Image (cartoon, rainbow, N blue to C red):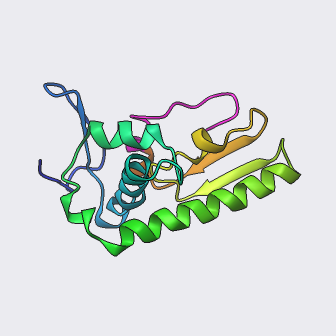
Amino acid sequence: MQHQASQPHPASTASTGQVAVELGPVQETLLIPLLGRARLSQQQPSLIQDPKALEIVSRLNYDFSKWEKSKSLWGATLRTRMIDEDVQDFLRQHPDGTVIEIGCGLNTRFERLDNGQLRWFDLDLPDTIALRRQFFQDGDRVR
């Protein structure tokens, strides 16, 4: 599986049903926290459960091996836990609050923390949003 950053938008690979990853080098780093959440879900489900991250990793046509031993992998996952706790604190005080996640990448925070009342906006660069739309749909409370 080769990564190619030359195309601006992701495309499904029809023969395999997998989604090609076609991101710039900066945007490509969004795969680090995604992989971290998937691995932690498998290895330490008491710390984080993220079935959507597992699904996305399995569907991406991408060689994740370069990130597997990266210290950034676990640092990004720890950061995810810390931000989750901050968002949960906010939602306890403002259950119908609005969250704007800037640089959302392939984050699954809405799916993991949704309280049924909040409004959520995911913002990122166009190629990232194009990839994101392969896995997430807008809804009444999430865009």
Q: Give the number of marks.
A: 0
In-front residue for pair 66/97: 66
Rendered view: 57 above or below 13: below
Which residue is found at the position 70% from the left and 33% from the top? 141
**Quadrant assignment for the C terminus:** top right
Q: Is residue 17 visible from the viewing direction of this image?
A: yes
Describe residue 77's horizontal placement relative to residue 55 as left or right: right
Which residue is found at the position 26% from the left and 50% from the top? 22
Residue that lies at the very extreme toward the right in this rendered image: 93
**Residue 7 horizontal/vertical position (percent):** 23, 50
In-front residue for pair 13/94: 94
Residue that lies at the very extreme toward the bottom in this rendered image: 71
Does residue 139 belong to the magenta stretch? Answer: yes
Rendered image quadrant of residue 4: bottom left
Give the residues in magenta. Answer: 130-143
Does residue 97 belong to the magenta stretch? Answer: no
Q: Is residue 10 visible from the viewing direction of this image?
A: no
Rendered view: 59 above or below 34: above
**Residue 99 horizontal/vertical position (percent):** 71, 51
**Residue 28 horizontal/vertical position (percent):** 32, 60
In-front residue for pair 38/106: 38
Rendered image quadrant of residue 118: top right
In-front residue for pair 97/125: 97
**Residue 57 horizontal/vertical position (percent):** 32, 44
Which residue is found at the position 79% from the left and 56% from the top? 90
Which residue is found at the position 26% from the left and 36% from the top? 11
Describe residue 62's horizontal placement relative to residue 118 as left or right: left
Describe residue 9's horizontal placement relative to residue 99 as left or right: left
Question: What secondary structure do most residues of the magenta stretch adopt?
Answer: loop
